[in-house]
Amino acid sequence: MFTRRLLPVLRRYSSLNRPSPIPLPREQQREFEQLQRAAQTPLAANNTPDDDLQLHPDAREPLRAEFEGDVNPKTGEQGGPKREPKRRFNQNVPKRAPSLFHRLIPRDTVVGATPRPRRAKGRE
């Protein structure tokens, strides 16, 4: 009874016993490990600090602050955002929600809508 339950589990995990790659000679293994360690260092020999700070050519320019200092001159707010968050459009309001759900809501439940006359079943 115990072996019937255990056998499928053992078969499932038997695929973990896979063959490993052929071991390298000592000199090549040391060279490989040394190259791996060198590649994992934060600043590799061929990287310069300027290369890490460059932006992608297609990236947008960062937004400039609308004012200098800690106090907003228009509102007097201290420690607030440097730019107006809703300057162009309000992202919190879904634009397409009414067009998505207008088919799901029956017209009779909408305020101000005129009810449609219902067809009798069996008549065309």
Image (tube, rainbow, N blue to C red):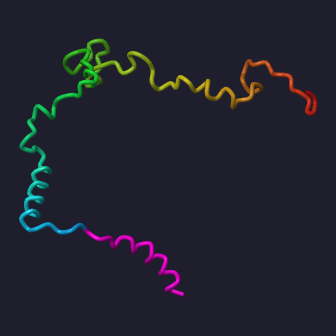
Residue 34 located left or right of residue 14: left
Q: Residue furthest right?
A: 123
Give the quadrant of the N terminus. Answer: bottom right
How many labels sit on residues?
0
Q: Residue 59: x and y, percent?
A: 27, 25
- The foreground one among 8 and 106 is 8
Magenta stretch, residue numbers: 1-20
Q: Residue furthest bottom?
A: 1
The quadrant in which residue 56 appears is top left
Q: Quick check: is 7 in the magenta stretch?
A: yes
- The foreground one among 78 and 36 is 36
Residue 96 located left or right of residue 63: right
Residue at left offset 58%, top offset 27%? 97
Q: Residue 112: x and y, percent?
A: 74, 18
When the figure is inspected, residue 67 is found, relative to residue 42, above or below; the finding is above
When the figure is inspected, residue 22 is found, relative to residue 71, above or below; the finding is below
Residue at left offset 86%, top offset 26%? 118
Q: Residue 94: x and y, percent?
A: 52, 26
Residue at left offset 6%, top offset 64%? 27
Give the quadrant of the C terminus. Answer: top right
- The foreground one among 55 and 108 is 55
When the figure is inspected, residue 26 is found, relative to residue 121, above or below; the finding is below
Main SS type for the magenta part?
helix
- The foreground one among 9 and 115 is 9
Q: Quick check: is 119 in the magenta stretch?
A: no
The quadrant in which residue 110 appears is top right
Q: Residue furthest top?
A: 74
Residue at left offset 61%, top offset 24%? 98
